Amino acid sequence: MQFVVTAFDYEDALERRLEHREAHLNGLRAMAKQGTFISGGAMVNDQGKMIGSNVHVAFPDLAALQAWLDSDPFTVHNVWETTTIHEIKLLAID
């Protein structure tokens, strides 16, 4: 199953985001090798400040996605204040 996760940071989270960013990215790199991370990146405001994240991921079910989300450094270290999850079907153009 494919999902889009949109996560908005706490207003005061930029320092925590930067502190835990490498661990977060290393996790995504490992997920890419496993085929669970499809695409994503930071969301920024009009001033270019990172304010959240958006990822496309593939997991067998919602429970597996939630297990990843619960263990991600940005969740564990209170970077993300809110997250939304939607099942999607990404367009594949050959």
Image (spheres, rainbow, N blue to C red):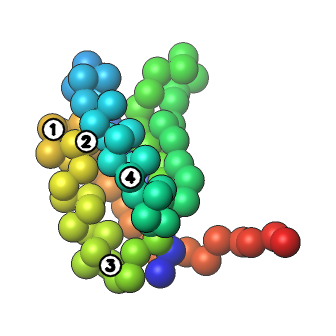
Residues packed near mark 3 inside 10 Å, few (<14), some (14 to 19) or many (20 plus): some
Point out residue 81 in the picture as x, y percentages from the top left corner.
25, 44
Q: CA distance from mark 3 to mark 1?
A: 22 Å
Observer able to see residue 11: no
The residue under the point 28% across, 75% down is: 64
Q: CA distance from mark 4 to mark 3?
A: 19 Å
The residue where tag 4 is placed is 30
The residue where tag 2 is placed is 74
Q: Is residue 79 above or below residue 94?
A: above
Give SS at disc 4: helix
**N-terminal label among 3 and 1:** 3
Inspect the image, locate mark 3, and give the three-letter code of the amino acid beneath it: Leu
Question: Extreme front residue here?
Answer: 33
Q: Nearer the viewer, mark 4 or mark 3?
A: 4
Q: Quadrant of the C terminus?
A: bottom right
Q: Quadrant of residue 63?
A: bottom left
**N-terminal label among 2 and 3:** 3
Q: Nearer the viewer, mark 4 or mark 2?
A: 4
Say which mark, if any, is on residue 77. Answer: 1
Q: Nearer the viewer, mark 4 or mark 1?
A: 4
The residue where tag 3 is placed is 62
Observer able to see residue 41: yes
The reply to whether the C-beta atoms of the residues labelled 1 and 2 are less than 8 Å apart is yes
Point out residue 33 in the picture as x, y percentages from the top left corner.
46, 58
Inspect the image, locate mark 1, and give the three-letter code of the amino acid beneath it: His
* Total number of numbered discs in the rendering: 4
**N-terminal label among 4 and 3:** 4
Inspect the image, locate mark 2, and give the three-letter code of the amino acid beneath it: Phe
Point out residue 37 in the picture as x, y percentages from the top left corner.
47, 59
Give SS at disc 1: loop
